[in-house]
Amino acid sequence: MMSFSLLLRPRYRDSLASRIGWRGEVCPPSLRQAPRSPWQRLCFWLLAPGPLQGSPSLNRLPPVRQDFRDSMHDIGTETARALCMRIDQARTLRELWHLRAELYNVVAVHHSQHEAERRVSQLNRHFPTRAPRSGFAPL
């Protein structure tokens, strides 16, 4: 006989994802760079990838770096300073996307897991998202 408490437990996607407000999967930015010359822009337009696969704008990098630094403004540990240096050295949005996990760990150790989830969810607005996969479609 199955325990009644097992029936009342929330499923994973009903707990963590809904508590921190994630509606979709956060994806890394494209590796493609924005075309610089008119000829490159024409070729890019003719061979245009899907809307979510386009290249991120290069001028978005400094404000995103600043948001990453601001999310650790109240943490003065050596680990946080080392992470800030890596954030400053990041050359693409994709590199910053990969630093989210390290930022989460630094904030969770210094504050709490809930605060780390809140700060990372604020940073996720800088990255593309896609709808969660349906449970009916094969992987």
Image (cartoon, rainbow, N blue to C red):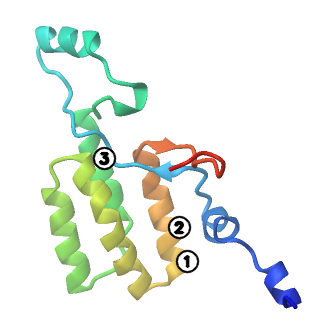
Quadrant hosting residue 33? top left
Q: Secondary structure at mark 1?
A: helix
User: In the rendered structure, are the residues bearing label 1 and label 3 in contact, judged by CB atoms less than 8 Å apart?
Assistant: no
Quadrant hosting residue 52? top left
Q: Is residue 110 above or below residue 120?
A: below
**Nearer to us: label 2 or label 3:** 2
Q: Can residue 69 be seen in this snapshot?
A: no
Q: Residues within 10 Å of mark 1 (few under 14, many from 20)?
A: few
Q: Is residue 92 left or right of residue 67?
A: left
Instruction: State the CA–CA distance, disc 2 to disc 1.
Output: 6 Å
Identify residue type, mark 2: Arg
Label ID, residue 114: 1
Q: Is residue 13 left or right of residue 65?
A: right
2 or 3: tag closer to the N-terminus = 3
1 or 3: tag closer to the N-terminus = 3
Q: Is residue 11 left or right of residue 33?
A: right
Instruction: State the CA–CA distance, disc 2 to disc 3.
Output: 19 Å
Report which residue position mark 3 lands on.
Answer: 63
